């Protein structure tokens, strides 16, 4: 169970404040690499947040490549990253890589039975 009073990781703070360059550089550190697997206080993974906050393609892909299992993780709305990408829009390259990482996402309906 996640709690609102648990503070976001440094990586999440950078993503949510759209500090893309700082987030990209932070991912080069050992702390940043470790935080790519840590959800926010609501259970959203960094991959969901990067997509939802419309991070640049290279940053989204870096997060995906660093933690491919995130492509299978569900967010607070029971959505996979592919659903979030469909909702908020991403490049065709990001879509292809999300599908490559978790092809079963194409058959997943997400929240409310609506395919992403």
Image: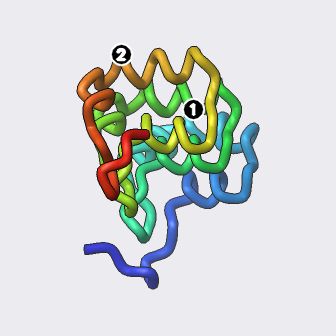
What residue would you read off at disc 1? 60
State the image coordinates of residue 100 (x, y, percent, origin top left): 36, 16
Up-down relation of residue 2 to residue 17 (above or below)? below
Q: Assign a secondary structure to mark 1.
A: helix
Camera-near label (2 vs 1) is 2
User: Is 15 situated left or right of 67 in this image?
Assistant: right
Up-down relation of residue 102 to residue 47 (above or below)? above
State the image coordinates of residue 97 (x, y, percent, origin top left): 45, 18
Q: Which residue is drawn at 37% across and 62% down?
A: 43
User: Is 28 situated left or right of 18 in this image?
Assistant: left
State the image coordinates of residue 44 (x, y, percent, origin top left): 42, 57
Up-down relation of residue 44 to residue 42 (above or below)? above
Separation (CA) of disc 2 from disc 1: 14 Å
Q: Are marks 2 and 1 in contact (CB under 8 Å)?
A: no
Quadrant for residue 3, please give it. bottom left
Up-down relation of residue 25 to residue 18 (above or below)? above
Q: Assign a secondary structure to mark 2.
A: helix
Q: Which numbered disc covers residue 100?
A: 2
Name of the residue lying farthest toward the bottom? 5
Q: How many marks can you see?
A: 2
Q: Which residue is drawn at 57% across and 41% down?
A: 51
Q: Residue at x 34, y 28 (%)?
A: 68
């Amino acid at each position: 169970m996640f709690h609102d009073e648990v503070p976001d990781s440094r990586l999440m703070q950078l993503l949510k404040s759209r500090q893309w360059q700082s987030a990209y550089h932070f991912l080069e550190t050992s702390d940043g690499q470790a935080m790519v697997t840590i959800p926010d206080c609501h259970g959203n993974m960094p991959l969901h947040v990067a997509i939802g906050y419309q991070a640049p393609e290279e940053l989204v892909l870096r997060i995906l490549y660093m933690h491919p299992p995130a492509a299978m993780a569900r967010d607070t709305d029971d959505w996979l990253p592919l659903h979030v990408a469909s909702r908020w829009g991403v490049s065709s390259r990001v879509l292809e890589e999300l599908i490559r990482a978790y092809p079963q996402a194409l058959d997943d309906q997400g929240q409310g039975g609506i395919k992403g």
